[in-house]
Amino acid sequence: MVEVLTINLDEELGFALEQRLPGPRDIITICASLVIIVPSTTKEPGRGQMVPKVHLAHFSIKEYLPSNQLPATVVSHFNFDTAPAHTSIARACLLYTLHLCSEAPLTQTVLDDHPLARYAAE
């Protein structure tokens, strides 16, 4: 999540590094009632290690946001259509991967140093 905040689809370069949160757990403070941290094991053979993953706090959140049920108030701008959202995620992943690969190919070190790299590349 911290890495996702650095991606800015409105910028020519696609990145706003100043948007990176100082600590990964800061996202929990910002989205306290929307997300939770769940321990998970990586799927890499021989490298299985515990890593925290961010999940929506409740299934109803996933159902509510794209439902067009948000009242016409300040929170209504959080409503989204899933097709454009998937397009934005794909664009963000491409920008992120291109940024990481601009000087060298994705290596294991790059993947280890940038938690979003594997997801974005896949």
Image (tube, rainbow, N blue to C red):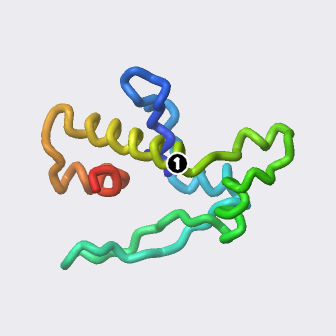
Q: In the image, residue 71 lies at what x, y percent? A: 85, 47
| Dot 1: element | helix
Left/right placement of residue 99 relative to residue 54 reads left
Left/right placement of residue 47 relative to residue 83 reads left
Residue at 34% in and 40% down: 96
Residue at 73% in and 59% down: 64
The residue tagged 1 is: 83
Residue at 34% in and 56% down: 119
- Of residue 111 and residue 11, the one placed in the foreground of this image is 11
In the rendered image, the quadrant that contains the C terminus is bottom left
Q: In the image, residue 91 lies at what x, y percent? A: 39, 39
- Of residue 73 and residue 34, the one placed in the foreground of this image is 73
In the figure, residue 34 lies in which quadrant? bottom right
- Of residue 4 and residue 19, the one placed in the foreground of this image is 4
Residue at 33% in and 73% down: 42
- Against 17, is 34 above or below? below
Residue lying farthest top? Answer: 12
- Against 63, is 86 above or below? above
**Three-letter amino acid code of the residue under disc 1:** Ala
Q: In the image, residue 94 lies at what x, y percent? A: 32, 40
Local packing at callout 1 (Cα closer than 10 Å; few below 14, some 14-19, many 20+) is few
